[in-house]
Amino acid sequence: MKRDFARRPLRLGRLFHSRPLYFVTFCTYRRRKWLARDDVRQAFVDFAANAQREFNVAVGRFLVMPEHVHLFACGDAAFVLGRWIGQLKQALARAAGLTRQSSQVWQEGCFDHVLRNDESYGQKWQYVRDNPVRAGLVASAEDWPYQGEIVYIDRA
């Protein structure tokens, strides 16, 4: 049976003319818990810092859970979110010593949402930041070591 929509829809960034702020979530394959590690966090920080220096991509706040990642990012007109997330996934898997040859590492694609002007970056971040508490991993959000902010993104 032929599918009417064989291709994925265009990423939202292609519909906006300014620098949209993306809220992105992506998950490990079958929600395997291997992300909440110091080496993976450091690979994330290194990748994001390089993205800012080399490609004008700003990663704001982020949180790495055992089986998924949340981040806020924006880039210039040449920024292609899907390609960039694919490269980030490769860097994180490599840091954890995982390869696609051995088994599937990531769930396909990612969830992305462009924050509208009236949406609060701070409120979205607070919800994300409380994930480890809701999951019973820490008593207080401040205690979760796999979070941070690479670049301050002003949404005022």
Image: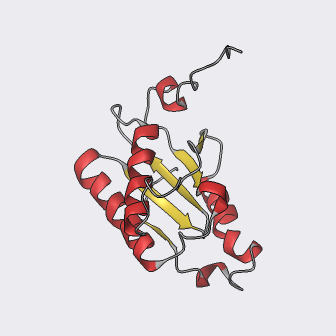
Q: Is residue 150 visible?
A: no
- Residue closest to the eye, 36 or 24: 36
User: In the rendered image of this protein, does residue 60 appear above or below residue 146?
Assistant: above
- The picture quadrant where one finds residue 109 is top right
Apparent side of residue 46 relative to residue 93 in the rendered image (left or right): left
User: In the rendered image of this protein, does residue 10 appear above or below residue 55?
Assistant: above
Residue 101, given in percent of the width and then of the height, sits at 43, 53
Residue 91, given in percent of the width and then of the height, sits at 37, 58
Residue 21, given in percent of the width and then of the height, sits at 50, 44
- The picture quadrant where one finds residue 141 is bottom right
How many numbered callouts?
0
- Residue closest to the eye, 126 or 108: 108
User: In the rendered image of this protein, does residue 22 appear above or below residue 41?
Assistant: above
Question: Residue shown at 64%/18% (left/top)?
Answer: 5
Apparent side of residue 48 relative to residue 111 in the rendered image (left or right): left
Of all residues, the one furthest to the front in this rendering is: 102
